[in-house]
Amino acid sequence: MRGFLQRAIAPLAFAAVLLGARAEAQAPSAGLVARGRYVAIASDCMPCHTAVGGKPYAGGLILNTAFGRLATPNITPDKATGIGTWTEAQFYRAMHKGVGPGHRLIFPVMPFPSYTRLPRTDVDALRAYLMSRPAVHAPRLPVTLNFPFNIRLMLRGWRLLYFRPRDFRDDPSQSAQWNRGAYLVEGPGHCGECHSPRNALGGMVAGRSLAGGMVDGFLASNISSDPRWGIGGWSQDALVDFLSHGSNARGVVFGPMTDVVHASLGKLTAGDVKAIAFYLKHTPPRPNLPTDVLAAKAAQASVASGRVLYASNCAPCHQADGAGVTGAIPNLAGNDALRADDPADAVMPMLAGLKGQGDYGAMPPFDALSDANIADIANYIRDAWSNAAPANATPASVHALRASASISADGSTTAGR
């Protein structure tokens, strides 16, 4: 009797497996792919998974971290080097739990601590879109993280300290716009991954979400609602304009954030951008930690030297009063990027230059200037025109930024977006 039942059930079991495989292999609907494309845009997938001059989503972008360098992987449907063999369940596990096929722990350079909040429906849609893309054969470059951070086993301890899988849940006490903005900022947008300070182990500093962090040598600015250090002093319209177009009266986007605006935020619906701005305007204010401003202001010799250097190197474009040229050359006076405690965003454009965007022209690197010269100019533009930021750039800090971003003496860079 047992043998008879086994023989009778076996074809049914095989049929169930076959039907499941066929369902997995069925082409997704156009609507699901379109939804997945929007999730990919909101998640900023393409800029990170595309090497400079490379094919979209084929990986190979070198990311500089405090623990060494890491190349992003190929997420095209190539079966040998991409995600072509990943099932829906495997893809969801990578996004929700940071675990790849074969129980391989994923380095948290991928922002799965934020992606964990995406619902299964959005993750499945994202996979459908990626699987609709052309397959590109692109083997992943070797991991070059420093010892011992290159040992995946160590990620178990990191995850115990800093990661808990969790879905996003609407706050019933908040409006629909606030909840939509919270989902986009905390989930696919993963804003806190770059705009939050991290400790020596790479974990986010508790209670400092959105207070600013470092990315490829650039300062990802404070975007909390703090009126002095964050975006609390910005109007809703000014913030929406900046997120949508990358510029407003307070400054122009640059560095890694450029790709975020032009490949992600600038392609979201107007309603979603407004929701992001609304949520950011209602986050807890995170004032910058106290610094010895008096000691920084004592560097008046550096500011005086910077004033002279600015006149000959910067004023021809940015004007003597720092006003720039509206729509063509960024203003320095009143530019919030220059007013943070950390002078990195005043220094990095001079070291690495800036790509042109829209009507704004490109800025070449100041490779003829020494670290001391660049520190002096940075201190001057941070101190001038009532910017009132600490004059705390030093030749040593400039040299460290030059090294962290792999900028050579001629101003070229080997990494970054």
Image: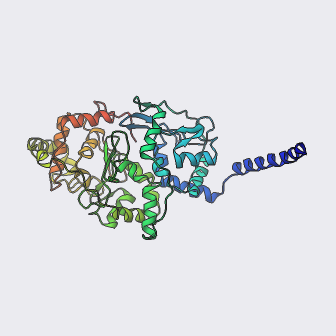
In this rendering, does residue 52 appear at all? Answer: no
Residue in the picture at 58% in, 46% down = 91
- Quadrant for the N terminus, please: top right
Quadrant assignment, res 387: bottom left
* Residue in the foreground of this view, choosing between 359 and 238: 238
Image point (64%, 40%), residue name: 85
- Residue 297, image x, y percentages: 11, 47
Q: Position of residue 226 (x, y in %)?
A: 27, 60
Left or right, 140 with respect to 63, comes to right
Q: Nearer the viewer, residue 62 or 242?
A: 62
Q: Position of residue 241 (x, y in %)?
A: 36, 62
**Residue found at x 38% / y 38%:** 65
Query: Could you tell whether 227 is left or right of 148 in the image?
Result: left
Q: Residue lying furthest front in this view?
A: 1
Q: Position of residue 213 (x, y in %)?
A: 32, 47
Q: How is the image coloured?
A: rainbow
Q: Considering only vertical position in the picture, is 407 above or below 255?
A: above
In this rendered view, identify the residue nearer to me: 226 or 202.
202
How many numbered badges does the structure rendering display? 0
Nearest the eye: 162 or 76: 162
| Quadrant position of the C terminus in the picture | top left
Q: Quadrant of residue 32?
A: bottom right
Answer left or right for 146 relative to 117: left
Left or right? Give the position of 99 relative to 344: right
Whether residue 204 can be seen here: yes
